[in-house]
Image (cartoon, rainbow, N blue to C red):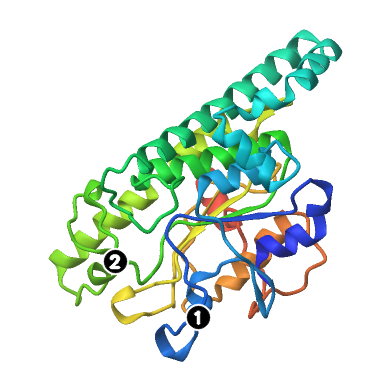
Amino acid sequence: TSLDQLYAQRFGQDTPIPSMQLCIENINQSGGCAYGYTCVYTDSISWASPTEPLPVIRDPRVAFDQLFGAGGTVEERVLRRRTNKSILDWITGRIAQLRRELGPNDIQRLDRYLDNVREIERRIQRTEAQNTSGESRELPEAPAGVPDSFEEHTRLMFDLQVLAFSSDVTRVFSLKMGRDSSARVFPESGSDRPFHPASHHGAREEAILDFAKINRYHVSMLPYFLEKLQGIQEGDTHLLDKTMIIYGSPMGDPNLHNHRRAPLFVAGGANGRLEGGLHLNTPDGTPMANAMLSLAHALGMDDMDSFGDSTAELSLSMPASTLTSAGS
């Protein structure tokens, strides 16, 4: 069972949606992939149990409707979209009633929330209009709600998460931004090579640097998400301080399909339980599950004794010896 689902199973019942799984590229949860495994093992990052991978949503429209959609049935939601009406048009009476019940500060917060809902909805509508206009697409197999632009698609998915977190619709998301075997080209990165062929760099410096451009481009998407979370006020702090974001890769050396020493970074404050500002280089052979166990404890699951193949907790704080040296 994956970490996000362990958290969702314990705390997700407090929200309308226990968790949501998103992706950017098409996910193939059948067929064969490397080493005789089915593709579900390389394409799924959220598992409700050791044998139950969870489906993922690629289309921002589908995610939007599940999170905020008005209309009690599929037919009603389709009708709303056909008439090009905003989701907010279906709840104007409730909004007016709510305004009468709120104080000035809460009304301002409600207005910001509704503005954000409408802005995301408009972006999805523009994408759908463009993709059904008859013009050629870069991603002809993708649903109409999926932007051809990797950056716009990723930002839409980030914005949906921020809006859902801020309204407490759900507290758990997973987002798979790419696939190890992807043949997609990311020209904005400065590389013209498809992702998977570029990952097999043959230990050649020029090819390694070219592949690094793609990875740098992918990671460059994250600050947008973090800044959005930081811009949402939550009590006496901001949403980023109350959130834990885990970003990683299954590959340590993709040229060899080596899963050892895979990189991982963590952002957010997790309600004050993450110190941050650290670069930890672990000894060879340290399971990534050790880090996951420590993160589970930071999320409030203190009674977990192990996670996967963990052997111990991984300290996520500055070593005491370092602090002593710095203060001497």
The residue nearer to you, when weighing 7 against 266, is: 7
The residue nearer to you, when weighing 23 against 191, is: 23
- Whether residue 180 is visible: yes
- Which residue is depicted at the point 68% across and 47% down? 74
- Which residue is depicted at the point 60% across and 42% down? 64
Upstream in sequence: badge 2 or badge 1: 2
The residue nearer to you, when weighing 50 against 292, is: 50
Within 10 Å of disc 2 (Cα), the crowding (few <14, some 14-19, many 20+) is few
Q: Measured from the top left, where is residue 136 in percent x and y?
A: 26, 47
Q: Nearer the viewer, mark 2 or mark 1?
A: 2
Label 1 amino acid?
Gly
Query: Is residue 191 found left or right of 253 in the rendered image?
Result: left
Q: Measured from the top left, where is residue 68 in percent x and y?
A: 67, 38
> What quarter of the picture does the N terminus occupy?
bottom right
Q: Measured from the top left, where is residue 132 in percent x and y?
A: 38, 42
Q: Measured from the top left, where is residue 311 in percent x and y?
A: 65, 79
Disc 2 to disc 1, C-alpha distance: 31 Å
Q: Residue 172: which numbered mark, if any? A: none
Instruction: Kindly indicate the quadrant of the structure image that contains residue 315.
Output: bottom right
- Which residue is depicted at the point 81% across and 59% down? 10
Query: Is residue 63 found left or right of 281 in the rendered image?
Result: right
Query: In this rendering, is residue 75 above or below 163?
Result: below
Instruction: Kindly indicate the quadrant of the structure image that contains residue 168.
Output: top right
Local SS, label 2: loop
- Whether residue 242 is visible: no
Q: Which residue is mark 1?
A: 285
Instruction: Kindly indicate the quadrant of the structure image that contains residue 131.
Output: top left
The residue nearer to you, when weighing 99 against 103, is: 99
Query: In this rendering, is residue 28 above or below 63?
Result: below
Query: Is residue 314 found left or right of 184 in the rendered image?
Result: right
Local SS, label 1: loop
Q: Residue 183: which numbered mark, if any? A: 2
